[in-house]
Image: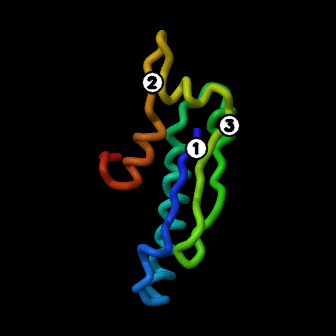
Amino acid sequence: MKITARINPKDIQGLTDEIKQDFTDQLNKLARDVYREIKLQTPVRTGELQRNWTLAGVFRELEGDVSIFNHTHYVNYVNYGTTTQAGQYFVEQATMRVLGTVPK
């Protein structure tokens, strides 16, 4: 499972350097907040799934990309469910909490 955010520099050409830096800082903070919330909301049985979340990349001057991923082989089964187990959708819920669309 992987979540990636990218910024197209052409979309932000008219911004001043100070605004670009503030926006970049906010994007990086948002990525860290989503990462932290996903880890907190990850169901824990052995702790392996929770420990294997990784935040990679950083925005610099509004360029770059940030990814949050987990290579644990069963992460999709826990998040989306199977034919015999309901999905928990903790990744989506954690992301929406940080973005302010779901109450905490």
Q: Which residue is mark 1?
A: 2
Q: Amino acid at mark 2?
A: Gly
Disc 3 crowd, CA 10 A, few/some/many (<14, 14-19, 20+) = few
Q: Does residue 86 appear to the left or right of 56 in the view shown?
A: left
Look at mark 3 in the image and give the residue it sits on.
Answer: 71
From the viewer's perspective, tell me whether residue 61 is left or right of residue 80. Answer: right
Question: What residue do we see at 63% from left, 26% from top?
Answer: 74
Which residue occupies 50% across, 30% down? 79
Quarter of the picture holding the N terminus: top right
Residue 98 coordinates in the image, percent (x, y): 41, 53
SS for tag 2?
A: loop
Q: Earlier in the sequence, mark 3 or mark 1?
A: 1
Q: Which mark is residue 98?
A: none
Q: Earlier in the sequence, mark 2 or mark 1?
A: 1
Q: Secondary structure at mark 1?
A: strand
Q: Residue at x 49, y 53 (%)?
A: 34
Q: Amino acid at mark 1?
A: Lys
Whole-Å distance between the Cαs marked 3 and 1?
Answer: 9 Å
Give the residue at mark 2. 87
Percent across and percent down for residue 99 are 37, 55
Residues marked 2 and 1 touching at CB (< 8 Å)? no
- Looking at the rendered structure, the kind of residue marked 3 is His
Residue at image x 62%, y 38%? 50
State how far apart marks 2 and 3 are (Cα): 18 Å
* 26 w.r.t. 3: above or below: below
Comparing 101 with 80, the one in front is 80
Please state which of residues 53 and 9 is positioned toward the viewer in this rendering.
9
Task: State how far apart marks 2 and 1 are (Cα).
Answer: 17 Å
The answer to whether marks 2 and 3 mark residues whose Cβ atoms lie closer than 8 Å is no
Q: Give residue 11's position: percent from left, percent from top.
A: 42, 73
